[in-house]
Image (cartoon, rainbow, N blue to C red):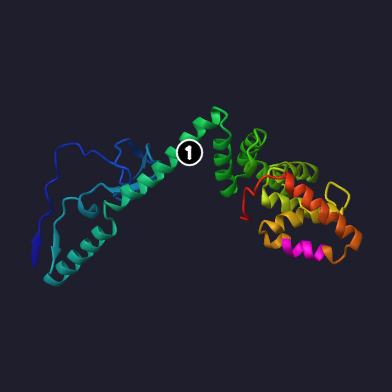
């Protein structure tokens, strides 16, 4: 049998570094049970937890490790796999990505404080996509009230669905109208449905046809489908008036500003 002594413990005090970001700003975590020879630390920089052995190799202290030839090979393989599975090069890469995201959010926050509508929309949209509707809505509304077209549509959608704010069809109609008149294709489609279904306004097949027809002409497939279904239940006089109104309204609008998401 081969007897392998463990390396002598250093008399220098050990500096504990975070395994994720390398920071030395760490402290023992309350998650440590104190019942084993590994201590859980929490990094003050990246807020992550990691564990450190307190008793030498694997928590064995200064005991000698007795290993036979076959077992020694197995242990060497295991150690090699362990080292490969925790490559130091992998950890900083992940930390750099997270840091980059935090830097981007911090930059947006600065622009938001200056009242920049694009930054308000970008940050609001980020919260919206993460289902943080309460945080998203005031930012989107602030951008919309400064004339940001995409934000105006998004606020209409929030009012329509009741996400981030109380459901309010009248407000949804107001914001969809603003963005539709600025050439926002999805808003034109939504506005047509509101007039078709009589939400916040009396049902109006002709007005519904106007907006569905405009959106359909710009490539909105669902608008085309619902426009044709609506046309099938309209009289020839209603359809004629609606088609004329579509041409007149479309002539006043700018080019389509957004495709269907």
Which element type, helix, strand or loop, lies under badge 1?
helix
Q: In front here: 164 or 260?
A: 260
Which residues lie in the magenta part? Answer: 224-230
In the displayed structure, 84 sits above or below 248; it is below
Q: Quadrant of residue 102?
A: top left
Residue 226 among those drawn in magenta: yes
Q: In front here: 32 or 100?
A: 100
The residue that appears at 61% across and 39% down in the rendered structure is: 135
* Furthest residue in direction bottom, as rendered: 70
Residue 194 among those drawn in magenta: no
Q: In front here: 101 or 218?
A: 218
Let me know if residue 131 appears in the view.
yes
The residue that appears at 62% across and 50% down in the rendered structure is: 258
The quarter of the picture where the C terminus appears is bottom right
Answer left or right for 67 relative to 110. Answer: left
**Which secondary structure dominates the residues rendered in magenta?**
helix
Q: Which residue is mark 1?
A: 105
Q: Quadrant of residue 154?
A: top right
Q: In x, y percent, where is residue 131?
A: 60, 48
Answer left or right for 117 relative to 225. Answer: left
The residue that appears at 55% across and 32% down in the rendered structure is: 112
């Amino acid at each position: 049998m081969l007897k392998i002594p463990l390396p002598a413990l250093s008399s220098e005090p050990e500096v504990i570094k975070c395994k994720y970001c390398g920071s030395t700003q760490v402290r023992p975590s309350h998650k440590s049970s104190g019942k084993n020879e590994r201590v859980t630390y929490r990094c003050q920089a990246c807020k992550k937890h990691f564990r450190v052995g307190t008793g030498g190799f694997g928590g064995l202290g200064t005991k000698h490790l007795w290993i036979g030839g076959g077992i020694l090979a197995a242990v060497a393989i295991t150690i090699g796999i362990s080292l490969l599975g925790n490559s130091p090069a992998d950890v900083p890469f992940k930390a750099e990505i997270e840091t980059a995201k935090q830097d981007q959010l911090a930059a947006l926050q600065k622009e938001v404080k200056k009242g920049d509508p694009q930054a308000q929309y970008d940050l609001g949209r980020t919260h919206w996509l993460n289902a943080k509707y309460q945080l998203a809505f005031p930012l989107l509304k602030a951008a919309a009230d400064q004339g940001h077209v995409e934000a105006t549509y998004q606020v209409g959608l929030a009012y329509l669905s009741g996400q981030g704010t109380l459901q309010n069809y009248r407000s949804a109609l107001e914001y969809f109208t603003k963005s539709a008149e600025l050439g926002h294709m999805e808003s034109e489609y939504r506005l047509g449905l509101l007039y078709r279904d009589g939400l916040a306004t009396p049902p109006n097949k002709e007005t519904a046809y106007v907006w569905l027809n405009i959106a359909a002409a710009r490539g909105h497939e669902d608008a085309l489908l619902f426009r044709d279904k609506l046309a099938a239940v309209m009289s020839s006089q209603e359809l004629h008036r609606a088609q004329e109104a579509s041409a007149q309204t479309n002539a006043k609008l700018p080019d389509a500003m957004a495709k269907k998401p």
